[in-house]
Amino acid sequence: MERAVAIKKLGKLLGKRLGYRVDRDAPDAETRAAVQRQLPGLRAAEQQVEAAMDARRAALLAADPEYQALAAAFQLARDGRQAAVAATSRYRITVGVSGVFFHVKAQGDSWEDVIAQMAKRAVVS
């Protein structure tokens, strides 16, 4: 089928927002099928080499005392940061709307804070 005829038919099916692209370098159906049949073997080879690489990395890093010290320090620093982030996200009072999910409308350390936030939202809306 010619491109002009095909585009005209597709335009009737898809409307004015029709778009298309042509890839002249794309493989044909037979080549795609041949490559598809090779994929399981290629994936198995990739997984085998990846497992060997991961084992080697683990052995090298386990034997490196400097890396182990850095990894421990990193874990302590990450735990401290995560605790600080968690503390900044917690409020004594949270008000919202229940449904399938709980939708938070206001948060604060006192009822007055929460009511002031809700009043401000009412004025804005």
Image (cartoon, rainbow, N blue to C red):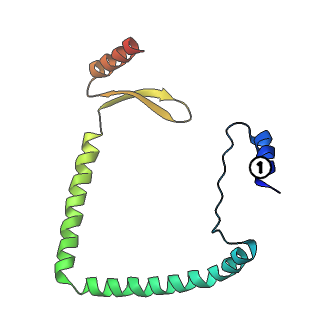
Side of 12 relative to 101 (left or right): right
In this view, 75 is above or below 100: below
Residue marked by disc 1: 4
Q: Identify the image quadrant of residue 60.
A: bottom left
Residue drawn where x is 38% and y is 86% of the image: 55
- Where disc 1 sits, the SS reads helix
Please tell me which residue lies in front, 34 or 75.
34
Please tell me which residue lies in front, 75 or 51.
51
Whole-percent x, y for residue 50 in the image: 45, 82
Task: Tell how many labels.
Answer: 1
Residue drawn where x is 64% and y is 62% of the image: 23
Whole-percent x, y for residue 119 in the image: 35, 14
Name the quadrant of the N terminus. bottom right
Whole-percent x, y for residue 49 in the image: 46, 86
In this view, 32 is above or below 122: below
Side of 18 relative to 71 (left or right): right
Name the quadrant of the C terminus. top left
